[in-house]
Amino acid sequence: MIEKKSPGVASAKPSSRGLVQIFTGDGKGKTSAALGVVVRAVGYGLRVCVIFFMKGDYPYGEFFTLPKLLNVDVASFGFRRLTDPANVKPEEIEQARQALAAAREALLGGKYDLVVLDEVNVAAAWKLVDLEEVIKLIRDRPPQVELVLTGRYADPRLIELADLVTVMTKVKHPYDKGVPARKGFEY
């Protein structure tokens, strides 16, 4: 029989040295890895902010769970429809601009120990946000704040600035066999 064990929330002093982590590549798991970092941080009572750059109000499972966690704030920008990188609309650029402003506020405001910028790499690659602004954000990061950037197409300049880079590589995916995304697993 499996027993549910709940030791409560441990406390930890925030690290005096935050790192910059990037999860990128064409494989599944970039957001999932970032959310794993969030779960660990919350387990120690750290304060977390997650900014979703391109997911809008699509009903991803994490949108229902994260706001219920202690010390986690969430902001989501973008639209339900997918952005066409060859035909970026002004309102998509505006949403990404707002996400970047929220990221700057979260990172520099002194309120959070961990800030996650989900899909920021894609937003920069598709010119929804200026790559130089993302670089500036990383450089302006207070040294004790952990920063996680996710999304395909991480620019080499972002990779150079990061302390940890993990590239998710697709070896095989059910989409290739016509299996659609499944609620609770892929979204």
Image (spheres, rainbow, N blue to C red):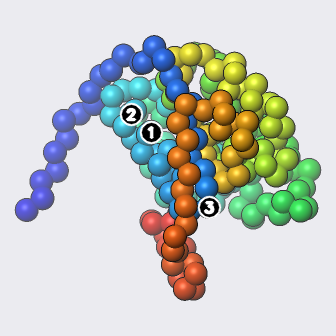
Tell me how far mark 3 sits from mark 2, CA to CA.
Answer: 28 Å
Instruction: Tell me, yes or no, if residue 78 can be seen here.
Output: yes
- Above or below, 149 against 151 in this view is above
The x and y percentages for residue 178 are 57, 85
- Identified by mark 1, the residue type is Val
Residue at 46 percent of width and 26 percent of height:
47
User: Could you classify mark 3 by the number of other residues whose Cα lies within 10 Å: few (under 14), some (14-19), or many (20 or more)?
Assistant: some
Instruction: Tell me, yes or no, if residue 147 can be seen here.
Output: no
The x and y percentages for residue 8 are 23, 33
Residue at 71 percent of width and 61 percent of height:
80
The x and y percentages for residue 134 are 75, 33
Which mark lies nearer to you, 1 or 3? 3
Disc ID at residue 42: 2
Q: Are the residues tagged 1 and 2 within 8 Å (C-beta)?
A: yes
Disc ID at residue 38: 1
Q: Quadrant of residue 71?
A: top left
